[in-house]
């Protein structure tokens, strides 16, 4: 067998082996993701019928994310649709373990950027739930701020995702802030700042502008859009 032919056979075997490895890795990753989502599904399946008021906490459990000086939680709460019906939305909450140095404790509502349409795309259901928060969450916790992050209606929970529909995004955001008022350890008040990126930047701007329409008892101190999509609404 010639050297060139031997090299070609060896190269083909290498490529075949690499392709097989990649295929097995992808299948294994998809299988692990499916198992994780199946384990999470009971938490994200809301009770039926829904009963309560917008901003009521339905469920809470540990998020399993290590943040120095804070506890992390996965939350399921009530929000409201355009027609007045109640809906369940999910999200995350990060609360400093140290007592509040000021009364009330500052609250930041994080509104996440575009992540996809499947339930597994919801930040609180991802393998690394706090991936969009790593650049600023530690500093916020050190300052004694609490943070809540909605997944938005229909992302992670049953229903239709209201992508870039400002009224629904505002409802989901203000109702996530209302959840904090039910936690006696959060030391929170009625003032909050909303911060978002991409889709969340769109949400942050509109929440800062129109939130009083949906939650008159809450006061937005600042609204920050790190980036927003160039789309009208």
Image (cartoon, rainbow, N blue to C red):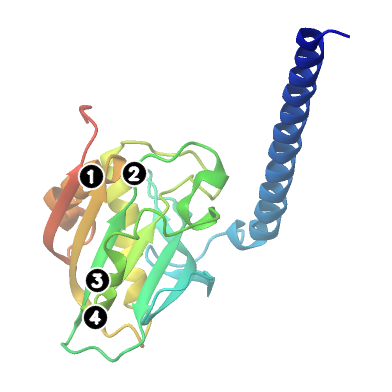
As measured in the structure, the alpha-carbon distance from the residue carrying label 3 to the one carrying label 2 is: 20 Å
Label 1 sits on a secondary structure element that is helix
Q: Residue 77 location, x and y as percent?
A: 45, 64
Label 3 sits on a secondary structure element that is helix
Judging by the rendered image, the residue that carries numbered circle 3 is 139
Closer to the eye: label 1 or 3: 3
Label 4 sits on a secondary structure element that is loop
Query: Image point 49% across, 49% down: which residue?
Result: 122
Judging by the rendered image, the residue that carries numbered circle 2 is 113
Query: Image point 21% across, 58% down: which residue?
Result: 194
Closer to us: 110 or 126 = 126
Chain-order first, disc 1 or disc 3 = 3
Label 2 sits on a secondary structure element that is loop
Q: Residue 128 location, x and y as percent?
A: 50, 57
As measured in the structure, the alpha-carbon distance from the residue carrying label 1 to the one carrying label 4 is: 23 Å
Q: Which numbered marker is on residue 201?
A: 1
Closer to the eye: label 3 or 2: 3
Query: Image point 48% across, 45% down: which residue?
Result: 154
Closer to the eye: label 1 or 4: 4
Rate crowding at label 1 as few (under 14), some (14 to 19) or many (20 or more) other CA atoms within 10 Å: many
Label pair 3/2, CB-CB below 8 angstroms: no
Chain-order first, disc 2 or disc 4 = 2
Closer to the eye: label 4 or 3: 3
Specify the quadrant of the image occupied by residue 202: top left
Judging by the rendered image, the residue that carries numbered circle 4 is 144
Q: Is residue 148 above or below residue 103?
A: above
Query: Image point 46% across, 73% down: which residue?
Result: 66
Chain-order first, disc 4 or disc 3 = 3
| Quadrant for the N terminus in the image | top right
Q: Is residue 156 above or below residue 18?
A: below
As measured in the structure, the alpha-carbon distance from the residue carrying label 2 to the one carrying label 4 is: 24 Å
């Amino acid at each position: 067998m010639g050297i060139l032919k031997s090299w070609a056979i060896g190269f083909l075997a290498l490529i075949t082996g690499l392709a097989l490895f990649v295929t097995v890795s992808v299948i294994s990753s998809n299988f692990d993701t499916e198992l994780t989502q199946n384990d999470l599904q009971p938490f994200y399946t809301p009770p039926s019928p829904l009963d309560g008021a917008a901003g009521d906490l339905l469920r809470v459990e540990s998020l399993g994310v290590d943040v120095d000086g804070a506890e992390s939680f996965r939350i399921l709460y009530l929000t409201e649709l355009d027609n007045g019906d109640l809906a369940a939305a999910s999200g995350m909450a990060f609360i400093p373990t140290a007592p509040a140095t000021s009364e009330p404790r500052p609250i930041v509502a994080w509104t996440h950027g575009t992540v996809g349409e499947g339930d597994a795309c919801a930040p609180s259901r991802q393998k690394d739930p706090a991936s969009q928060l790593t650049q600023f969450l530690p500093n916020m916790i050190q300052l004694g701020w609490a943070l809540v992050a909605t997944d938005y209606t229909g992302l992670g929970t049953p229903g239709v995702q209201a992508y870039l529909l400002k009224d629904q995004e505002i409802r989901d955001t203000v109702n996530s802030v209302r959840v904090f008022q039910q936690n006696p350890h959060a030391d929170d008040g009625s003032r909050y700042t909303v911060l978002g990126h991409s889709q969340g930047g769109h949400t942050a701007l509109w929440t800062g502008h129109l939130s009083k329409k949906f939650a008159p008892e809450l006061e937005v101190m600042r609204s920050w859009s790190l980036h927003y999509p160039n789309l009208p609404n």
